[in-house]
Image: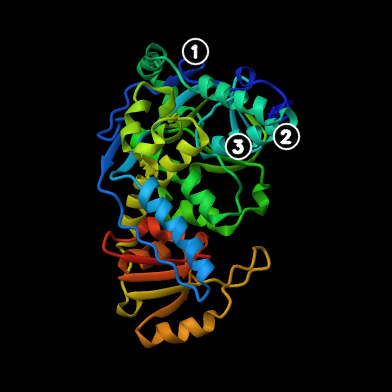
């Protein structure tokens, strides 16, 4: 099942690399899908996010406040964006490294596409120089955008064969070792299986050897989607499927529709002049103010199951620490013991997410009033927090 091409094809022009929906008969939306959240995007009230600079060093405080002011003044939307994800039926789907290809050309969609395009542009800048690389970046924007007619054609395509639901469902993964990336970028798309009634085998494909995957991979699947566990396979790239279903997220794919420009009004006035949906800077701001419907569905499934666990009154205020693991980077915080002593005086309990299965982790976040920790993958469990939970993150 292995493919024989180099990945990524950094030495080729964008028109030979990228495959965009609407420009190929190899991609179709799954027939008969219906979902109240099937609009390409919806808006809602923004999250309550606040930042403050804490340092004895004046210059550090000034630098921190500059970052906070930039976010609050220029990069924070007045509305939160929820993007939809739809299942695609594709021919000749291949996973090379952690990237998805259709018919030998890269599908610019999903979080992996951000990494791919960034690496491609870095390579072009190194080999072509700044001026020519900027032209390449513009060419990528043109290749990953479409006319209204092309986009509407893509959105109206469907598969007449209802047996398409029996095809393999293929999800690309950055690796099987990082909790944050696996959960937020890959696991979340399992929610599509129930939403669209998919009945075939499910493949998570990554450059990581499946035998070296961390226990949380099986734990997350088993705890949050137990009815799908026997259909899930963890595979190592490269893999090729003659015909399969994969996901298409409009968080990275709205640029291929006529609605892309609608988001322009959410941007700060000064950022609208050179606005382009597929530009790297624009995309980064959109991602800071949005989430994918698959992530919301995953959180709902996890919380529903977590609510069956008993709650503990002593777990209303939590300090989440990290254990030193020889298989992972040491992320413990210097002088943490001094902070813990202060927190314990005001009712905080010290916990380690590593001590609990995923379902209990979700329950802890859901039931807590306040959760505090330093920056790390463990705070990805914010997905499962109650709307009334206050989450405090310490960064540097």
Residue shown at 58% from the left, 72% from the top: 332
Q: Is residue 378 visible?
A: no
**Foreground label between 1 and 3:** 3
- Nearest the camera: 77 or 99? 77
Residue 227 placed where, x, y %? 41, 47
How far across and down, in percent of the image, does residue 139 sit? 57, 21
Residue 185 located left or right of residue 240: left
Q: Quadrant of the N terminus?
A: top right
- Counting residues from the start of the chain, the first of labels 2 and 1 encountered is 1
Mark before the other along the chain sequence, 1 or 3? 1
Answer above or below: position of 43 versus 277: below
Compared with 96, 222 (above or below) is: below
Q: Nearer the viewer, residue 134 or 43?
A: 134
Distance in Å between CA atoms under marks 2 and 3: 12 Å
Closer to us: 126 or 206: 126
Cα separation between marks 1 and 3: 27 Å
Q: Secondary structure at mark 2?
A: helix
Is 367 placed left or right of 282 in the picture? Answer: left
Q: Which residue is mark 2?
A: 126
Tell me if residue 197 comes above or below residue 370 in the rendering: above
Label 2 or label 1, whichever lies nearer to me, is 2
- Verify CB contact (< 8 Å) between mark 1 and mark 3: no
The residue at 31%/53% (across/down) is 47
Q: Position of residue 267 (x, y in %)?
A: 35, 38
Determine whether the residue tagged by mark 1 lies in a helix, strand or loop.
Answer: loop
Quickly name the residue at label 3. Answer: 118
Query: Which residue was labeled with disc 1?
Result: 25
Up/down of 96 relative to 318, above or below: above
Which mark is drawn over residue 360?
Answer: none
């Amino acid at each position: 099942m292995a493919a024989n091409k180099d990945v990524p094809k950094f030495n080729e022009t964008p028109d030979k690399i990228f495959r965009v929906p609407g420009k190929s008969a190899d991609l179709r939306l799954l027939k008969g899908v219906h979902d109240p959240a099937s609009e390409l995007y919806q808006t809602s009230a923004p999250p309550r996010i606040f930042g403050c600079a804490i340092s004895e060093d004046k210059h550090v405080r000034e630098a921190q406040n500059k970052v906070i002011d930039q976010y609050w003044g220029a990069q924070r939307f007045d509305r939160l964006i929820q993007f939809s994800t739809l299942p695609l039926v594709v021919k000749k789907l291949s996973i090379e490294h952690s990237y998805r290809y259709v018919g030998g050309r890269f599908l610019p969609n999903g979080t992996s596409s951000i990494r791919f395009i960034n690496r491609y542009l870095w390579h072009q800048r190194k080999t072509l120089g700044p001026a020519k690389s900027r032209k390449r970046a513009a060419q990528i924007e043109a290749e990953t955008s479409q006319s209204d007619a092309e986009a509407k054609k893509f959105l109206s395509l469907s598969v007449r064969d209802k047996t398409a639901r029996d095809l393999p469902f293929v999800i690309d993964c950055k690796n099987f070792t990082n909790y944050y990336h696996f959960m937020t970028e890959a696991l979340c798309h399992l929610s599509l299986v129930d939403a669209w009634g998919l009945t075939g085998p499910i493949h998570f494909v990554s450059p990581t050897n499946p035998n070296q995957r961390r226990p949380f991979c099986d734990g997350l699947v088993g705890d949050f989607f137990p009815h799908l566990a026997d259909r899930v396979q963890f595979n190592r790239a490269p893999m090729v499927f003659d015909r399969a279903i994969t996901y298409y997220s409009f968080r990275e794919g709205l640029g291929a529709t006529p609605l892309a420009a609608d988001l322009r009004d959410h941007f700060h006035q000064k950022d609208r002049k050179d606005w382009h949906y597929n530009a790297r800077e624009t995309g980064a701001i959109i991602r800071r103010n949005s989430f994918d419907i698959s992530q919301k569905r995953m959180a709902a499934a996890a919380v529903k199951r977590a609510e069956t666990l008993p709650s503990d009154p002593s777990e209303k205020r939590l300090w989440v620490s990290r254990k030193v693991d020889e298989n992972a980077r040491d992320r413990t915080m210097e002088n943490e013991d001094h902070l813990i002593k202060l927190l314990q005086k005001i009712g905080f309990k010290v916990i380690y997410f590593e001590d609990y299965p995923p379902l209990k982790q979700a329950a802890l976040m859901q039931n807590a009033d306040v959760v505090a920790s330093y920056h790390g993958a463990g705070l990805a469990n914010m997905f499962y927090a109650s709307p009334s939970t206050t989450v405090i993150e310490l960064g540097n």
